[in-house]
Structure formats: structure tokens, C-alpha cells
Image (cartoon, rainbow, N blue to C red):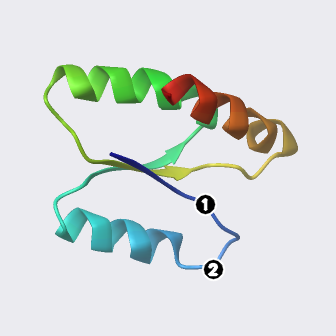
Amino acid sequence: EIAIITGLSGAGRRTAAHTMEDLGWYVVDNLPPVMLPTLAQTLRGYGVVRIAVVADVRSREQFEQLPDAIKRLK
């Protein structure tokens, strides 16, 4: 399972991440979207099955990378 947390500043991304950590998810904060597939592959190699990522999409370029990163996860 992979959850991607995004949102504007002050929207509660970090609160959501803390909650998911409390529920047993492996959480990575401020990850550029382009790194998402590599992270997932690496963590799965260590047996991690529930990954939550706070995606850093502050710039237009990073935001545009998110759909491709998600496709590569499938």
C-alpha cells in the first residue's frame, strides 16, 4: 500500500503524516515525486508494505512529475 499526502502549506500534511506513523505506516516527508518509485522499490525490498509519502510539490516542475511517478508505481 502506498499513500501520497499532498497539499498547500498549512493544510495539515504533517498532521496526516504523524497519524499514519501512529497507525504503523512508514512515512517519508518532503520527497520529490521523481524519487517515489525508487523509494517504494527499496522499502519493499526490506519488507515494508505500508508506505506514506508527503510529496514535495512546491514547484511546478515537481508537481508535473507526480502523475508519471504514480504511473511508474503500478
Q: Residues within 10 Å of mark 2 (few under 14, many from 20)?
A: few
Tally the numbered discs. 2
Residue at 71%, 37% in the rendered image? 67
Image: 34 above or below 11: above
Q: Which structural element holds mark 1? A: loop
Q: Is residue 38 left or right of residue 10?
A: left
Front residue of 73/14: it is 73
Q: Quadrant of residue 6?
A: bottom right
Front residue of 22/69: it is 69
Q: Is residue 45 left or right of residue 34?
A: left
Front residue of 62/3: it is 3
Report the residue marked by disc 2.
10
Q: Which structural element holds mark 2? A: loop
The x and y percentages for residue 19 are 30, 74
Q: Residue furthest right?
A: 60
Tell me the quarter of the image containing the N terminus.
top left
Q: Is residue 56 left or right of residue 19?
A: right
Residue at 70%, 49% in the rendered image? 57
Report the residue marked by disc 1.
6
The x and y percentages for residue 68 are 69, 29
Front residue of 71/61: it is 71
Question: Disc 2 marks which amino acid?
Answer: Gly
In front: mark 2 or mark 1? 1
Question: Disc 1 marks which amino acid?
Answer: Thr
Image: 4 above or below 66: below
The x and y percentages for residue 63 are 77, 44
